Image (cartoon, rainbow, N blue to C red):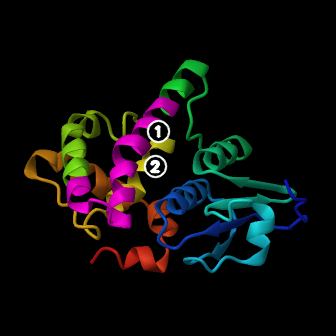
């Protein structure tokens, strides 16, 4: 890994419409962490981003002499570095279960979303995402937040995806009203609103 020059404030290289960057911004906002956001759009990568991250991808987090990439690694690091409020469970069994849920969120929901964004069999991906979220409606209704009574890293993963549904033409049916109710609770949070880029705000009327 390339050497990272020390910085006085944490920096996040973030795509303004990237759902993975949004997940990290949500964690940062929920924890009230001061951070400098460097917006990275399309292929216009800052030179220092390529030095920090060999993939030149977003999100990339720089904290003093540490550079991190991969959304899950960044979110777990932030949760351990700034433990209040906690977003991951403390005990190993519960942490493992939370990681499995995150894995399924990415495979079952972010997978179709990526195909919609890329325009790869987008109609089929919309149907797949709509049906998968609808089938999970009971999970959204079971507790205040997703599978938990306290806001967690799982909500930070689900929220950015749900925010993008109307923009990408995914309309949930009546059977998924619990998903929409959950989404409205989440979107009303000050931390969620603070996590939005200007471009993301324009994704919903």
Total labels: the figure holds: 2
* The residue positioned farthest toward the top in the image shown: 93
Label 1 secondary element: helix
Camera sees residue 112: yes
Is residue 66 one of those drawn in magenta? no
Residue 144 position, x and y percent, is: 33, 40
Q: Residue at x 56, y 54 (%)?
A: 27
Residue 171 position, x and y percent, is: 17, 60
**How packed is label 1: few (under 14 Cα within 10 Å), some, or many (20 or more)?**
some
Label 2 secondary element: helix
Tell me whether the residue at label 2 lies in contact with that at label 1, contact meaning CB atoms closer than 8 angstroms.
yes
In which quadrant of the rendered view does residue 4 lie? Answer: bottom right
Residue occupied by mark 1: 102
* The residue positioned farthest toward the left in the image shown: 174
Q: Residue at x 60, y 22 (%)?
A: 91
Q: Which of pointers 2 and 1 lies earlier in the amino acid sequence?
A: 1
Q: Is residue 85 above or below residue 165?
A: above
**How packed is label 2: few (under 14 Cα within 10 Å), some, or many (20 or more)?**
many
Is residue 106 one of those drawn in magenta? yes
User: What's drawn in magenta, residue-wise?
Assistant: 99-126
Q: Residue at x 60, y 21 (%)?
A: 92
Residue 176 position, x and y percent, is: 16, 47
Residue occupied by mark 2: 157
Camera sees residue 152: no
User: In the image, is 71 to the left or to the right of 1?
Assistant: left
């Amino acid at each position: 890994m390339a050497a990272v020059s020390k910085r006085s404030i944490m920096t996040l290289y973030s795509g303004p419409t990237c759902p993975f960057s949004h997940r990290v911004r949500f964690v940062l906002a929920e924890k009230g962490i001061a951070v400098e956001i460097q917006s990275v759009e399309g292929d216009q990568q800052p030179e220092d981003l390529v030095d920090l991250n060999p993939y030149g991808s977003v999100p990339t987090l720089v904290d003093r002499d540490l550079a991190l990439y991969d959304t899950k690694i960044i979110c777990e690091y932030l949760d351990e570095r700034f433990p209040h409020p906690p977003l991951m469970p403390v005990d190993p069994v519960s942490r493992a279960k939370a990681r499995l849920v995150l894995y399924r969120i990415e495979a079952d929901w972010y997978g179709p979303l990526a195909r919609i964004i890329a325009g790869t069999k987008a109609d089929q991906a919309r149907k797949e995402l709509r049906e998968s979220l609808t089938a999970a409606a009971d999970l959204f209704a079971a507790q205040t937040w997703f599978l938990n009574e306290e806001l967690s890293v799982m909500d930070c993963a689900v929220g950015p995806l749900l925010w993008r549904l109307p923009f990408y033409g995914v309309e949930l049916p009546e059977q998924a009203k619990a998903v929409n109710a959950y989404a409205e609770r989440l979107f009303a949070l000050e931390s969620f609103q603070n996590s939005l880029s200007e471009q993301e705000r324009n994704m919903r009327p």
